[in-house]
Image (cartoon, grey):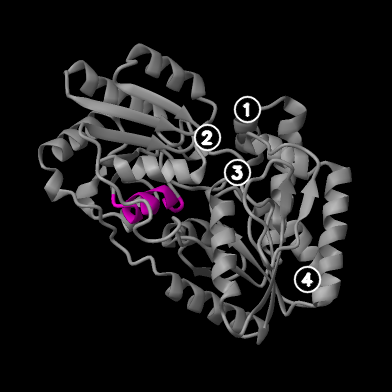
Amino acid sequence: MRVLIISDTIEFSGAEESIVTLAKLLSQASDVELRFCSTRFIDNSMERLSFEDSYVINKKKPLSIEELYLTLLNPIIFTKVLRHYMEVADDFRPDIVHSGIFLSVIPSIIIARKLKVPVIEHVHDYRVLSLTDLPYLQGYISRLSYTQELKHYIQKVEFYKAVFAVGFRRLLQSLYNQCNLLIAVSNFVKKSLSPYLKPPIEVVHNVVDTGGKGRYNKRKRDKISVVYSGRLSLAKGFPIFLKATEMLLRSDTDIEIHITGRGELEALAHRFANTYPRKVQFHGYLPSNELYDLIASCHVTVHPSLWPEPYGLSVIKSVKLGTTAIASNRGDLPELLPPKYLFKPNAKELYNKLLEFFRNPDEFPPSLAIDVNSANTTNKLLDIYRLVTRGSV
């Protein structure tokens, strides 16, 4: 079976990382011939894959999702990228096209229609219903009216961009509905989006590659250490983390706080670290190997999402690295963690959960509530490919 995977870019966020990991797994299957098409920027550090045929954009990697979208949707860049993908597809002649992430549905649909082969779309979050996470901070998913959607976009961008975003988002939803099948990364995503999308939806959990079991196993730090790693945003609950850990610091709890990542609330991270210079370190963005070293050496990672987390990759990474993860009870997180590792997303609840962990760390070993198995993921994806190519869905 010949599979063409198309992704928006090679490395940017957890979604891109997941698709690359999935492609690596598929490349090892004996009955699959794989091509992976994406975009690269001149400062991408990830080594080129043996089955990869990506287009290089002569710019540095964008720092925000908005900048990434503006780059990829630039008419000149988009045309060149699409032409490159079509040349690869014409030469490769795939049996199925797998769109890896959101924007890649556009070239995937075009290529699949031209070659008259089926196309599936990987759904990592809720962007098909809203390009911003602002509507979902209460923890549930619903479809917005034109006016509601526009109102949320105006809080982020100029009016003309907001109007364009409304139309563009609806165009992408129509393309999703032209796919033969959708793959959701969690049961929560499937349940949330099923009422609004036409194709059948299957669940395939993302898998995590931390560079080999035991590679980052190391002795824990002498002082109890807490890590927040990820997007520094309201949706991810970063202000909740700051309030809860400040309560701990003011109570003279002997801990150290580590913050990594970037985002719109980066200034708060700098201010917090400057306020408590002996207790708090803000590392900014860390390459994977440095991030994994940090997580493996600490005692607990915190994931206080306000929005309904589609799939907690950072939770799985933490546990795979031998570090306990605690998380809010939003979205898919209750699927990933046992109940006692969960808290309601507010500062007081997080503060109490951390105190509970500090007092009895042996009662909170690194644990997941599901088995994230790469072999099962590969086999399920191959079964989906076979069903779709046979026209059975």
Which residue position holds label 3? Answer: 130
What separation in Å lies between label 2 and label 1 (alpha carbons)?
A: 10 Å
Question: How far apart in space, not on screen, are marks 3 and 4 (Cα)?
Answer: 25 Å
Of marks 2 and 4, the one in the foreground: 4
Q: Nearer the viewer, residue 185 or 83?
A: 83
Left or right: where 339 falls relative to 78: left
What amino acid type is highlighted by mark number 1? Lys
Q: Give the labeled residue for mark 4.
A: 112
Looking at the image, tell me whether mark 2 or mark 1 is earlier in sequence order: 2
Q: Could you tell me if residue 393 is visible in this image?
A: no
Amino acid type, mark 4: Ala
Label 2 to label 4, Cα distance in Å?
A: 33 Å
Q: Is residue 70 left or right of residue 304?
A: right
Q: Position of residue 31 (x, y in %)?
A: 61, 85
Please state which of the two labelled residues, at mark 3 or mark 4, is closer to the viewer. Answer: 4
Marks 1/3: CA–CA distance? 13 Å
Q: Amino acid at mark 2?
A: Leu
Amino acid at pointer 3: Ser
Does residue 286 sit above or below 324 in this rendering? above
The stretch of residues the image draws in magenta is 310-322
Q: Secondary structure at mark 1?
A: loop
Q: Are marks 3 and 2 in contact (CB under 8 Å)?
A: yes
- The residue drawn where x is 70% and y is 35% is 67
| Residue with the mark numbered 2 | 134
Disc number for residue 156: 1
